[in-house]
Image (cartoon, grey):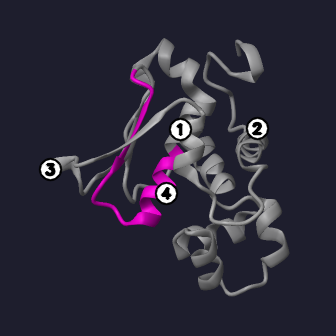
Amino acid sequence: MAMLDEGIIAEVPARPRYKLAQARADALTVRYSTPPIPVLEIAEQTGVNVVFSDFGKHSDTVAGFCDFEARRLYVNAKDIRTRQLFTMAHELGHWVMHREVFLRDPSRYPVLPRFQSVEASNIFEREANCFAANLLVPKRLLDPVRNSPVSTLAEVFGVSRAMMENRLKNG
């Protein structure tokens, strides 16, 4: 694996780097002491613009995508807010963790289809999902309130109930 500055990879990793995804998300949220985490603000601070778009006939199948060359994250304007936030965080994960790989070979980046489970072999998607979960619900903010009702946690963190259930289950 070819390494660049700050641990950015230029080739596909052999396995998902969950600890790196968590560390990068934590670094971006460290200054926030209460939820919800301002994902849009964080994305813009990393140098990308977030564009809410009407994907036309693809609105039912596409949640969003990252355009590395244009420095933009596109988010489905028709999705509910919690889905948009997860999409923003997921695509920001690609921006933060995978930019060099995708700039070298743009064909490696697929659009994230809504409701599709991540393939076990898709390392990039798994890392981006891990990054998104840690960005939206940082462990240091979740741990003190972990035993609260799931619906309350989801509302406070501004995420869907399903996302919060997954976050609680997977740490």
Residue at 71 percent of width and 43 percent of height: 28
Residue at 66 percent of width and 52 percent of height: 135
Amino acid type at mark 3: Lys
Q: Which comes before the other along the chain, label 4 or label 3?
A: 3
Q: Secondary structure at mark 3?
A: helix
37 over 97 or under it: above or below: below
Residue at 51 percent of width and 56 percent of height: 86
* Label 1 sits on residue: 44
Q: Nearer the viewer, mark 4 or mark 1?
A: 1
- CA gap, disc 4 and disc 2: 21 Å
Category of crowding for the residue at label 3, using alpha-carbon neighbours closer than 10 angstroms: few (below 14), some (14–19), many (at least 20): few
Q: Secondary structure at mark 2?
A: helix
Q: Using the rendered view, name the quadrant where residue 93 is placed.
A: top right
Residues drawn in magenta: 70-90
* Label 2 sits on residue: 20
Category of crowding for the residue at label 4, using alpha-carbon neighbours closer than 10 angstroms: few (below 14), some (14–19), many (at least 20): many
Q: Which comes before the other along the chain, label 1 or label 3?
A: 1
The residue lying toward the viewer, choosing from 156 and 168, is: 156
22 lies left or right of 114: right
Q: Quadrant of the N terminus?
A: top right
- CA gap, disc 4 and disc 1: 14 Å
Q: Secondary structure at mark 1?
A: helix
Q: Say if mark 2 contacts mark 3, CB within 8 Å.
A: no
Residue 53 screen position, x and y as percent: 27, 46
Amino acid type at mark 4: Leu
Category of crowding for the residue at label 1, using alpha-carbon neighbours closer than 10 angstroms: few (below 14), some (14–19), many (at least 20): some
* Label 4 sits on residue: 85
Q: Say if mark 1 contacts mark 2, CB within 8 Å.
A: no
